[in-house]
Amino acid sequence: MASIGDIPVQVEGAPAAPAEYGNALPVLSEVRHALAQLVDGGEPTQIDLGAMPFGPGDEDRLMALLGSGEVTASVNALGLTRIQETAYRGVWIVEYLNTDDQRVALHLEIATVPQLLRSPPADLSDALAALETQLAAAEAK
Amino acid sequence: MATSSPQRPAGQSAPTMDPPLGPIQRPTLGESLRRNGVSRRGFLKFCAATASMMALPPSMAPAIAAALETARRPSVIWLSFQECTGCTESLTRSFSPTVENLILDTISLDYHHTLQAAAGDAAEHAREEAMRANAGAYLVVVDGSLPGPKANPGHSTIAGISNYDMLMETVADAAAVIAVGSCAAFGGLPKADPNPSGAVAVQDLVKDKPVINVSGCPPLPMVITGVLAQYLTFGKLPELDEYNRPRAFFGQSIHDRCYRRPFYDKGLFAETFDDEGAKKGWCLYRLGCKGPMTYNACATMKWNGGSSWPVESGAPCLGCSEPDFWDAGGFYDALSVPPGNSGEMLLTAGAAGVAVGAGVGLLARSKAKSAEKQHQTVTAEQLEQKL
């Protein structure tokens, strides 16, 4: 069977430049508001970019406006989560991927440290117990 | 809706924050995830994605995590009546494996004609067994409309049981009913004029249980699973709109969340499907977009794993999540044009731009009703001319 690539497609004229939908700037304004809130009262904010009415190119435009900063991190739990600090300190891009590397959510976090990077408090006592067990086993030898 | 109290046998738990348990003790979601080696970070991530899926703010993730830790898998019986299987296709085409699948792993789908392995008597026994074991606590999902009690039951039967009898028997001990798709919610295509099978919607028949309508032709996969996730997470039914649709997903019009809305506000419209305006992605209002009267989540959740949605592909919204959208005039007639009247009004409608906006939704709804009465047919030639 012929593949889809075998179908001859002729493009006439130069492809049109992507339209400017203007939906990125209002989000940037929301980020500014959230950052001011973090500075004033230490209150973090999460913005779900999946809930934004973005057209083609809007997300790229927002990402270009935010730029990239010093910190990148990845969390490997139930698929990869990519975390990137933007050029604006305290503004983080958090991209959640599933085990097939498909995006399941895209958030902006305005915080000193993104929530997912912190060790869950309930894990700390589990970790302590595990460490003590290992030490006890080593000492018994 | 959470306050409406379905009838259930004495001793059965209500679908509240207490685990919606039937006599079968099922593991909590937290337990089953931990058993599958999912870490707390993984769980928190899952909850962040779930918040997006349920159209809740991401800050709800810790609350979702706390609730899900103790949630138990509810039993779900899925009935398919006069339908095209498009709703099930939509559900199973949720890009897998992902949060949706995790949710599917965490409900107990005990009966589904299309997806279950069992056939014939064994299938019907699975339904009866699920009803018996989870009486008062199971969810019934219905896709498709069904012939009403006065219609000829021969139009649609399963295993020799009429759709009407099967629905009434199955919902008798259910906690709630979720009508998936515009057919189950509003009658859909089978009920379109002249409605040869006497089709009715689920809410026309089920009066003593909460009915949640998840409309759309088909509904977004994330909306189907999101409603189930909400029930699983918070143990209660979501807040509903005037058509019994969950507000979280159907609370805003396509028009208000459309990325092309700025062009509408500027009065920039595509006039045909291949003119300059269409290529530049201008507003599709004059090409018949039903966005202003349609309440759904397509504009933000999008289709096919978030890759696109009809308007982004240059097609006007057909209004498929609204009641009787098949009979609401031509798909390509602009909203402010009364059925059977085109041309001049089409142009003035666009020029009026912003001023039209506010009234359009109301107008469209009343138009939909009047269109039902003066239903107009259109030939392929007329459609071609219009395009």
Image: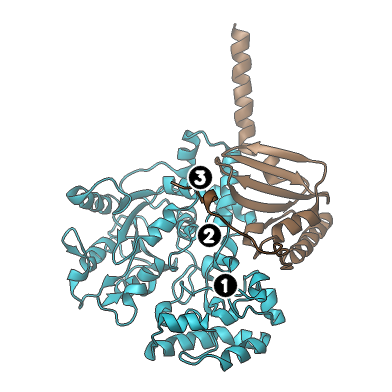
Q: Nearer the viewer, residue B182 or B65?
A: B182
Picture disc at residue B254: 1
Q: Position of residue A22 (x, y in %)?
A: 74, 68
Compared with residue A63, is residue B82 higher up or lower down, i.e. above or below?
Answer: below
Q: Residue at x 61, y 17 (%)?
A: A134
Q: Seen in the image, is A112 located left or right of residue A51?
A: right
Q: Nearer the viewer, residue B363 or B57?
A: B363
Res A43 visible: no
Which is more foreground, mark 1 or mark 2? 2
Could you say whether the residue bearing mark 2 is in a helix, strand or loop? loop
Res B316 visible: yes
Q: CA distance from mark 1 to mark 2?
A: 14 Å
Picture disc at residue B67: none
Report the residue marked by disc 3: B69
Q: Residue at x 57, y 36 (%)?
A: B39
Rendered colour, chain B: cyan
Chain at numbered mark 1: B
Report the residue marked by disc 2: B303
Q: Seen in the image, is A21 located left or right of residue B292?
A: right
Chain at numbered mark 2: B
Q: Position of residue A106 (x, y in %)?
A: 65, 52
Disc 1 marks a residue whose amino acid type is Ile
